[in-house]
């Protein structure tokens, strides 16, 4: 081992030891089983030669420091480490060690991707074969849960549709009408259970068509047929997509529509940047899929608009009129629907409190830790803003903003609240940073166990519409055993890694950083929606809720194909 690598090895292993020490992990009884393999892995990693500097050192070290801080932040937050001088020194050593480790890992990942390109001259898998594989897996998942599943939000949407609650756009109106309309049709044909079954089958087929189409389209870029088959098997048999696609609620279709938008964006980018052409059919599909994303999630507009705006300026603005028209159609339909049609139908918009989850969490944490530093004016504004401002500190839950968010009054002066929010943040900025990190870290910490959608495997009791007779026709023991088995398999380390949305985010960051430096900003356009979704997740009320971040996993697999294609044909 070279001298420089030897010192790096010592720093990394010291950092790992200190991290174990912070977590009170005693390796005396399992030293050979844990520490020795880690030492060997680090040694091998440091001694793999880099043929060149693939990722700009400034960028790679910045990303490595960020990931190190995230790793340490999770440990400090869970263990409540006191920031005394000795602990600060230990933390610095850990951060330095992990930064070195992550930086080398990033470089090696990019080196490996450039050497082992997956793009060949093969035609890939047909959509029919992909469709058959996915349907087979999903039917196996559906049989123990006949007539289908209903999530809590789906229950509430049914309550709205059947007139037992005022219709709102809190849960997107179109998804509510589709769910309720199909269930109501089945209810009149046979009974309530058949209505649920009818909706589940229709949603299952729509989602399956979308995923098989996406796999087929990216496979035409030159993906080996076997990879297309493996990909289809994974989508068909992983609970991540199987459960969510056969449960009555809005998220199953949204995740599929997001996948369709990303695929359309990828194919559009390939044709514009590599093949130097524009296909009008792709433009129509891009616009339609963008609208579907917007209509099935209230914040979907923020995920699709930035990429379409960027397309206006690519290729020396050659197609600026075309993409401007697409943007105008998208905005016109979206605005007309939300500002004209919904008010005409007396459908209430989503509450403004939904946009204030993060500020409210920061305010609540400030009140909890610094109650004596709130000024008279701030107390008055808080009193005008919240139903019970004195209880905010007690209601504060680091991982869930709902208890404090629902304490907001229906009517209050947003400007006055934002003013005192800024004042308090300037006085104790670290309180706001801590509230943000503790309430969002599950979306970008790749070391956490990946979640899946097995919670969808139920007819939820939350807001259950008792006026409908929805019940399983299969025994509970069968359903419980099936979910237990699926959870066990999905939790296996190797499989779980491929379901990890936080890891998917970091793959997206790494791909974007490399392509930006090597080929230019325009190649990032298909990845922008991933980052926009991350920002939306950070502003969301619940930490690590898979419903918010689950759309990125399939999208990243599509983007990896795009990444390998760009590498091959730009190089």
Image: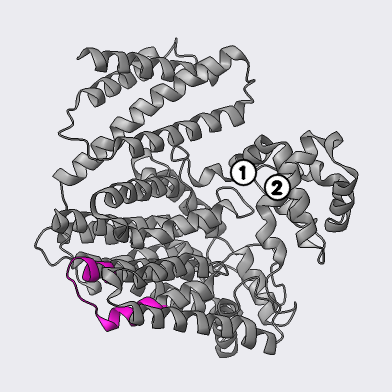
Compared to 245, does 545 lie above or below?
above
Cα separation between marks 2 and 1? 8 Å
The circle on residue 436 is 1
Extreme residue toward the left, this view: 121
Disc 2: which residue:
361
- Residue at position x 18%, y 31% in the image: 50
SS assignment at label 2: helix
What's the magenta region?
267-288
Q: Crowding near pointer 2: few (<14 within 10 Å), some, many (20+)?
A: many
Quarter of the view holding residue 231: bottom left
Compared to 341, does 196 lie above or below?
above
Quarter of the view holding residue 373: top right
Is mark 2 in CB contact (under 8 Å) with mark 1?
A: yes
Percent x, y of residue 191: 59, 83
- Residue at position x 69%, y 68% in the image: 464
Tell me, yes or no, whether the highlighted magenta stretch contains residue 425: no
Q: Tell me if I can see residue 212 in this picture.
A: no
SS assignment at label 1: helix
Q: Crowding near pointer 1: few (<14 within 10 Å), some, many (20+)?
A: many
Q: Which of marks 2 and 1 is nearer the N terminus?
A: 2
Of the pair 520 and 449, the residue shown nearer to us: 520
Of the pair 208 and 540, the residue shown nearer to us: 540
Q: Tell me if I can see residue 375 in this picture.
A: yes
């Amino acid at each position: 081992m070279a001298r420089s690598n030897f010192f790096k090895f010592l720093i990394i292993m010291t950092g790992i030891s200190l991290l174990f020490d912070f977590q009170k992990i005693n390796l005396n009884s399992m030293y050979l089983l844990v520490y020795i393999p880690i030492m060997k892995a680090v040694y091998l990693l440091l001694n793999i030669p880099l043929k060149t500097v693939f990722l700009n050192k400034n960028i790679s070290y910045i990303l490595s420091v960020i990931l190190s801080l995230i790793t340490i932040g999770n440990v400090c937050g869970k263990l409540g480490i006191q920031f005394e001088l000795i602990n600060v020194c230990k933390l610095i050593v850990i951060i330095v060690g992990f930064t070195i480790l992550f930086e080398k890992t990033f470089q090696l990942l990019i080196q490996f991707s450039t050497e082992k390109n997956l793009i060949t001259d093969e035609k890939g898998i047909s959509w029919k074969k992909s469709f058959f594989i996915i349907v087979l897996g999903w039917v196996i998942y559906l049989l123990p849960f006949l007539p289908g599943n209903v999530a809590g939000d789906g229950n509430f949407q049914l309550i709205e549709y059947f007139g037992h609650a005022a219709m709102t756009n809190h849960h997107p109106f179109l998804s509510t009408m589709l769910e309720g309309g199909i269930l109501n049709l089945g209810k009149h044909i046979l009974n309530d259970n058949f209505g649920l079954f009818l909706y589940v089958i229709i949603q299952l087929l729509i989602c399956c068509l979308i995923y098989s189409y996406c796999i087929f389209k990216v496979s035409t870029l030159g993906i080996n047929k076997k990879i297309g088959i493996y990909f289809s098997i994974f989508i068909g048999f992983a609970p991540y997509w199987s459960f969510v696609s056969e449960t009555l609620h809005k998220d199953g279709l949204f995740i599929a529509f997001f996948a369709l938008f990303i695929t359309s964006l990828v194919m559009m980018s390939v044709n514009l940047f590599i093949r130097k052409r524009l296909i009008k059919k792709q433009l129509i599909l891009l616009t339609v899929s963008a609208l579907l994303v917007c209509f099935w999630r209230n914040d979907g507009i923020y995920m699709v608009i930035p990429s379409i705006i960027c397309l206006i300026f690519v290729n020396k603005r050659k197609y600026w009129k075309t993409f401007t028209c697409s943007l105008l159609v998208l905005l016109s339909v979206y605005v007309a629907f939300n500002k004209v049609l919904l008010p005409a139908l007396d459908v209430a918009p989503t509450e403004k409190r939904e946009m204030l989850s993060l500020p409210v969490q920061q305010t609540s944490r400030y009140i909890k830790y610094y109650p004596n530093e709130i000024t008279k004016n701030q107390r008055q504004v808080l009193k005008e803003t919240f139903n019970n401002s004195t209880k905010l500190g007690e209601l504060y839950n680091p991982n869930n903003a709902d208890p404090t968010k629902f304490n907001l009054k229906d009517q209050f002066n947003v400007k006055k609240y934002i003013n005192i929010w800024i004042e308090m943040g300037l006085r104790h900025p670290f309180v706001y940073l801590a509230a943000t990190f503790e309430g969002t870290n599950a979306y970008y910490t790749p070391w956490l166990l990946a979640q899946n959608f097995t919670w969808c495997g139920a007819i939820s009791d939350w807001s259950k519409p008792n006026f409908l007779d929805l019940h399983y026709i299969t025994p509970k023991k069968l359903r419980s055993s099936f979910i237990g088995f699926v959870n066990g398999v999905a939790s296996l380390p190797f499989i779980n890694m491929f379901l990890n949305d936080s890891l998917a985010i970091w793959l997206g960051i790494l791909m974007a950083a490399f392509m930006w430096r090597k080929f230019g900003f325009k190649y990032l356009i298909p990845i922008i929606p991933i980052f926009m979704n991350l920002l939306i997740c950070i502003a969301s009320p619940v930490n690590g809720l898979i419903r918010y971040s689950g759309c990125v996993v399939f999208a990243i697999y599509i983007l990896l194909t795009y990444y390998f294609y760009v590498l091959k044909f730009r190089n």
